[in-house]
Amino acid sequence: MLESVIASPEVVHYICKRFDIKMSKKLGQNFLIKRGIVDEIVHAAELTPGEPVLEVGPGIGTLTQGLAQSGADVTAIELDRRLLEVLDTTLASYDNVRIVHGDVLKLDVPTIMNHKPFKVVANLPYYITTPIIMSLLESKLPPLTLQLLAENVIKHNMISIRNPMVISITYSEAEDQLVVNNSLRPKKSVQSSGIGLRNLSSRYRLICGREITIEHTSDLFIVKIPLLHE
């Protein structure tokens, strides 16, 4: 199992106190404090040594450390200037990590990633998840895989250290579609009507005559969305 020293309440508290870091509500910051969650995210990303991976919003480096320990070539884009010094300290022992300061929505991501295919692994606040996904998918070099934690999914699913919530968005070149899936562990206290997905599917069918496919297994919820081309 990957070791992730930063991913504990005690270490996160120590780092925040040492650097006088208070999480910004404006930026939707939240720092992972469970090593098991970091391990599961890294495992789900299926990274290989030397493989380019982009992390958006590394924070204090909790998930970044797990990515670095996989041997992947990690580029982390951080908007909050206060955290640059923290990252330089917490990730000092990893020579396969590069920190870039800036707004991922304004940066030239393909150039930053050397115009090569890459994966994206990120712990994102809900309010910025969609803009970042769309920005990456509309770039000249879409990422091969997005592994994202979206806060809204947690509303309908149980989450634990042993079974973290993982969402993936992949592009199927053979079928020319996005495949979106998330681990499925519905909360008994929250019933989903499914109206939102049915409305989306109906509108998609009306506008372009193509179908959105919705599937699920005992532990996975899957939505397949055909891409539209001009």
Image (cartoon, rainbow, N blue to C red):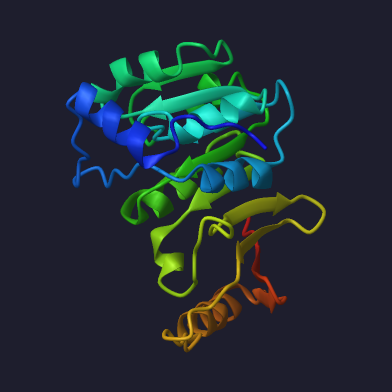
Looking at the image, which residue is at 62% across and 40% down? Answer: 42
Count of all numbered marks drawn on residues in the image = 0
Residue 127 visible: yes
Q: Position of residue 122 (x, y in %)?
A: 48, 41
Whether residue 193 is situated above or below residue 164 in the rendered picture: below
The answer to whether 209 is drawn above or below residue 67 in the figure is below
Residue 209 position, x and y percent, is 65, 77
- Residue placed at 25% from the left, 42% from the top? 27
**Residue at left 51%, top 11%?**
93
Where the C terminus falls, by quadrant? bottom right
Image position of 207 with respect to 53: above or below: below
Residue 105: percent from the left, percent from the top?
37, 36
Foreground pick, 201 / 10: 10
Outermost residue to the right: 174
- 68 vs 189, left or right, is right
Q: Quadrant of residue 66?
A: top right
> In the image shown, does 148 or 161 lie closer to the viewer?
161
Is any atom of residue 107 visible in this view?
no
The one of 201 and 217 positioned closer to us in this rendering: 217
- Quadrant location of residue 72? top right
Instruction: Give x and y (percent) for residue 35.
Output: 51, 42
* Residue occupying the point 60% across, 79% down: 205
Q: Is residue 165 left or right of residue 30?
A: right
Residue 25 falls left or right of residue 95 = left
Q: Quadrant of the N terminus?
A: top right
